[in-house]
Image (spheres, grey):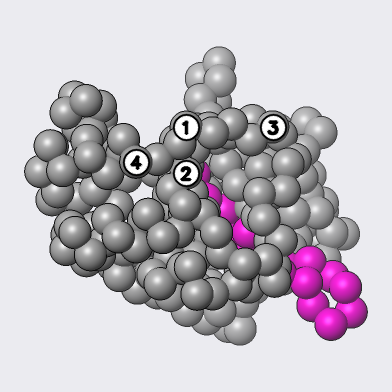
């Protein structure tokens, strides 16, 4: 079991600095769970009953605007917590989580995770660090949306997603997102995203399949992301 704890310590910052034996205890309290592609893990407004640590796959976190349009707040990849943290058993989800691809996860019920956080102070510290990091990323994305043109913003979002949810296939990196979902992530229109992606496809930077972006030149995207 200690070996298993070490495995997840390397996978997720949730376990950063926690001794191997303590990791094993924390991991053993979770239930391994599978989520099929496009399964909703929770809806906005649901009571927070579980803490979900993704070990395989990717999950999108969305909110609905007043007009019913969806905004993707972030994507969660392996090693990341899906949804809320902290004193979770007393709260409700403010967003909806949906599996983009088949996923595997470790799932703790909220009271169990809260008890573990009290027992292992480093787990509580790591939880707070993850929350602070999320806030920092959201602040950065808000600044980008407010001040930058769409092309570098979209390119930067794709670059950001590569290490997070990109899958290496035949020498390229695949991101399982549709053009509509990319528009929801970058606060722009489907038409604009389609136009930019088609242009970059002609340049050989990427190629497109249904609900998949295949990045062939990360350096090309990086160059576009740095345009002023």
- Residue 182: x percent and y percent? 71, 55
- Gap between marks 2 and 3 measured at Cα: 15 Å
Q: How many marks?
A: 4
Give the number of the mark in front: 1 or 3.
Answer: 1
- Residue that carries the numbered disc 1 in the rendered image: 32
Q: Nearer the viewer, mark 4 or mark 3?
A: 4
Please state the extent of the stretch shown in magenta in the rendering. Answer: 61-77
Q: Secondary structure at mark 3?
A: loop
Looking at the picture, tell me which residue is in the foreground, 61 or 35.
Answer: 35
Q: Is residue 40 above or below residue 44?
A: above
Mark 4, secondary structure of its residue: loop
Q: Quadrant of residue 118?
A: bottom left
Disc nearest the viewer among 2 and 4: 4
Q: Which residue is mark 4?
A: 29
Residue 82 in picture, x, y percent from top left = 52, 54
Q: CA distance from mark 1 to mark 3?
A: 14 Å
- Are discs 2 and 1 less than 8 Å apart at CB? yes
Image coords of residue 67 (percent x, y):
89, 79
């Amino acid at each position: 079991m200690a070996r298993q704890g070490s495995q997840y310590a390397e996978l997720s910052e949730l376990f950063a600095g926690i001794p191997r034996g303590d990791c094993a205890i924390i991991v053993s309290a979770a239930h391994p769970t599978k989520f099929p592609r496009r399964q909703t893990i929770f809806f906005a407004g649901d009571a927070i009953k579980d803490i979900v640590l993704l070990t395989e796959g990717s999950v999108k976190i969305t909110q609905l605007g007043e007009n019913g349009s969806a905004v993707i707040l972030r994507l969660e990849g392996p090693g990341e917590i899906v949804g809320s943290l902290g004193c979770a058993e007393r709260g409700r989800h403010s967003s909806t989580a949906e599996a983009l691809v088949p996923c595997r996860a470790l799932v703790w019920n909220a009271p169990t995770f809260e008890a573990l956080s009290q027992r292992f102070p480093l787990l509580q510290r790591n939880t707070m660090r993850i929350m602070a990091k999320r806030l920092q990323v959201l602040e950065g994305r808000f600044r980008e949306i407010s001040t930058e043109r769409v092309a570098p913003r979209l390119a930067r979002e794709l670059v950001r997603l590569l290490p997070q949810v990109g899958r290496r296939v035949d020498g390229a990196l695949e991101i399982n997102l549709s053009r509509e979902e990319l528009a929801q992530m970058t606060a722009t229109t489907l038409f604009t995203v389609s136009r930019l992606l088609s242009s970059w496809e002609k340049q050989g930077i990427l190629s497109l399949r249904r609900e998949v972006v295949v990045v062939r030149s990360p350096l090309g995207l990086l160059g576009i992301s740095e345009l002023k």
